[in-house]
Image (tube, rainbow, N blue to C red):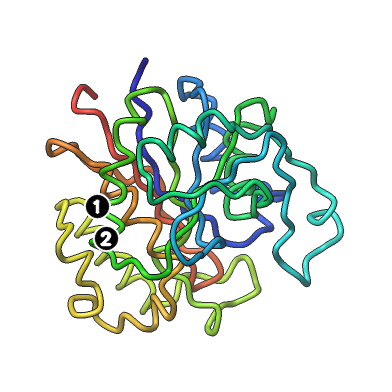
Amino acid sequence: MSYCNPLFIGHGSPMNAIETNRYTRFLNDYGAAMKRPRAVVVISAHWETDGTRVTGAENPHQIYDFGGFPRELRSLVYSPKGDPELANSLVEMIPEIAIDSQRGIDHGAWSIVKNLFPRADIPLIQISLDRHKSPRDLIAFGAKLAPLAHENVLFIGSGNMIHNLRDISYETETPPFAWAVEIDRWFQEKIEQCAIEDLCDFRQKLPNYLRAVPTNEHLFPLFVILGMRQNDQPIQTIFDEIQNGSIAMRSIAVLSTHE
């Protein structure tokens, strides 16, 4: 089996599932260039639980977990199969995980994977975010997942390093706000330096962190992916942009040491 680079992908607005822009073209190209994984596992900002869960349905339903968007978005169908066998393997590997056979796939997962693999022919499952885990807890959890990246399973953390809906502009051409650019540069520097401890301590180290991270759920999938880094693997920014003034779409990959 081959190695799949674990990814953190900024997902931004659900509209990215149906729009054509620089970000969606990047996802299309990245997916087309990637060796086909045997399955995709997404840790999405939009599924928080007490404890950790994994979707176990053979055919998980598509969740339209948003409101106020065009009918075209709510009628979009992207429904790849699940992978109960992989879900069971995860539970065997990490007994703290429990299977949820009723949960579907939320837009934090399908809006990204639809652009990466538009044919919907790769099994897709989700792992929830345990709302009680700290950044370091999530890094430790990611380390437990890491062996599966070497078995051609693609892990994606889905969220945003900066996710401020209070200050957001609904004009798609709005330039990035100055404060968002400054904070995005902080994330860029820490990622390029592999400064994991500083990232974990963002509340103390990141200036004006509450403006970037008013709530944890969009940042915390990043820590699961960082935890999958082993043996000083390099981390590479694969996309950077700030949409709607205040939403960072910065995306990273944990690279194989052979790349």
**Can you give x and y, in whole percent of width and height, for residue 258 in the image?**
20, 22
According to the picture, the residue beneath numbered tag 2 turns out to be 137
- Identify the secondary structure beneath mark 2: helix
Q: In the rendered image of this protein, does residue 9 appear above or below residue 161?
A: above
**Can you give x and y, in whole percent of width and height, for residue 112 in the image?**
58, 46
Nearer-the-camera pick, 106 or 207: 106
Three-letter code for the amino acid on which mark 2 is drawn: Asp
According to the picture, the residue beneath numbered tag 1 turns out to be 140
Nearer-the-camera pick, 73 or 147: 147
Q: How many marks?
A: 2
- Identify the secondary structure beneath mark 1: helix
Determine the residue positioned at 33% across, 48% down. 225
Q: In the rendered image of this protein, does residue 132 appear above or below residue 116?
A: below
Determine the residue positioned at 43% across, 37% down. 90
**Can you give x and y, in whole percent of width and height, for residue 125 in the image?**
57, 40
Determine the residue positioned at 30% across, 73% down. 182
Tag 1 near tag 2, CB within 8 Å: yes
Q: Quadrant of residue 136?
A: bottom left
Q: In the rendered image of this protein, does residue 91 appear above or below residue 52?
A: above
For residue 114, the mark is none
Find the distance from the CA under tag 1 to the CA under tag 2: 5 Å
**Can you give x and y, in whole percent of width and height, for residue 80 in the image?**
69, 34
Q: The C terminus appears in which quarter of the rendering?
A: top left
Three-letter code for the amino acid on which mark 1 is drawn: Ala
Q: The N terminus appears in which quarter of the rendering?
A: top left
Q: Quadrant of residue 196?
A: bottom left
Determine the residue positioned at 14% across, 62% down. 197
